[in-house]
Image (cartoon, grey):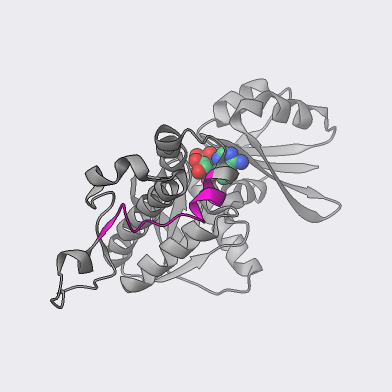
Amino acid sequence: MIFGIDAGGTLIKVAYAKNGTLQFTKFPIAEIEKVASWVNEQSESRVCITGGKAGVLLSLLNKKAKEIMEFEATHLGVKFLLERMGRVEDSYLVTNVGTGTSIHCIENNRQERIGGTGVGGGTLLGLSHLLTGVTNYEEIVRMAGTGSRDRIDLKVKHIYEGKEPPISGELTASNFGNNLFSVAAELSREELLAAVLGLVGETVSTVSVHAAKQCGVSTIIYIGSSFFENPLLKEVVTSYTVLRGAQPLFLENGEFSGAVGALSLV
Ligand code: ADP
């Protein structure tokens, strides 16, 4: 068996080839020893590892493994997954919304990291927990999907009351910036979670659109486990990216880009 493993800050993503077919699986980082045992049990296996916790995983393996820098692995994986989707793209931006967010410009088959933000999937989990006590990712996403941000966020059109605003009135003027003091005690967990998700989605898409302009491209490929079964985050990111003049693309299995890139180098 051959393995490509991306050991990140929150999740370990594994791409492996079994009987000639590509398979994907993931584990929480707390289960790093279980992943190591699984790989150690396979005879005749070859492994390539990437990600911030690659060194920890390597130290738990009883066999030799290759290591590849995570930005290069992600770049190779994105190329592979794009082709698998039948897309031909030469120049584009990749925004990886993992625990944090990393942004890369791809041109002439080379990647350059051009920025990022500490607002990412970790912010979604952390702020959600602090504000509502909810800890589970699936529950946060499900509850956020039934909440409204109207009482929490301030939109441009709310400021320009009765007057045409100079920019789209639908843009958020201030996340969590509405007149919260009067309603704070009444806000439901669903409303708060929707607002946290909105903050994360709008921040990563806004930063990405600026980065795309700097890079001279209009397609932004969004990857990372923060989009996993998270239609609301995809919707927020899509509408904000389009509103600001770029084209979003969500890669199928995009959260496995790093693992797939590592697998291609085994
Ligand atoms: P990293 O490589 O830094 O671990 P990922 O791309 O795996 O980053 O994304 C991690 C984020 O994905 C988390 O911060 C969280 O928002 C989201 N996520 C998706 N599925 C899960 C899950 N089962 N458990 C925890 N977080 C999850």
Rendered residue at 57%/47% (across/down): 258
Q: Residue at the spot x=29%, y=46% of the render?
A: 183
Which residue is at the front of the view, 152 or 211? 152
Q: Is residue 97 or residue 134 the one in the foreground?
A: 134
Q: Is residue 169 visible?
A: yes
- The secondary structure making up most of the magenta span is loop
Q: Is residue 19 magenta?
A: no
Does residue 108 appear anywhere in the picture? no
Residues drawn in magenta = 140-154
Measuring 70% from the left and 24% from the top, which residue is drawn there?
A: 61
Ligand 1 picture quarter: top right
Report x, y in % for residue 73: 54, 48
Q: Is residue 49 above or below residue 37?
A: below
Q: Is residue 176 above or below residue 208?
A: above
In the depicted structure, whether residue 133 falls above or below residue 160: above
The quarter holding residue 181 reads top left
Point out the image quarter for the C terminus: top right
Q: Position of residue 126 (x, y in %)?
A: 43, 35
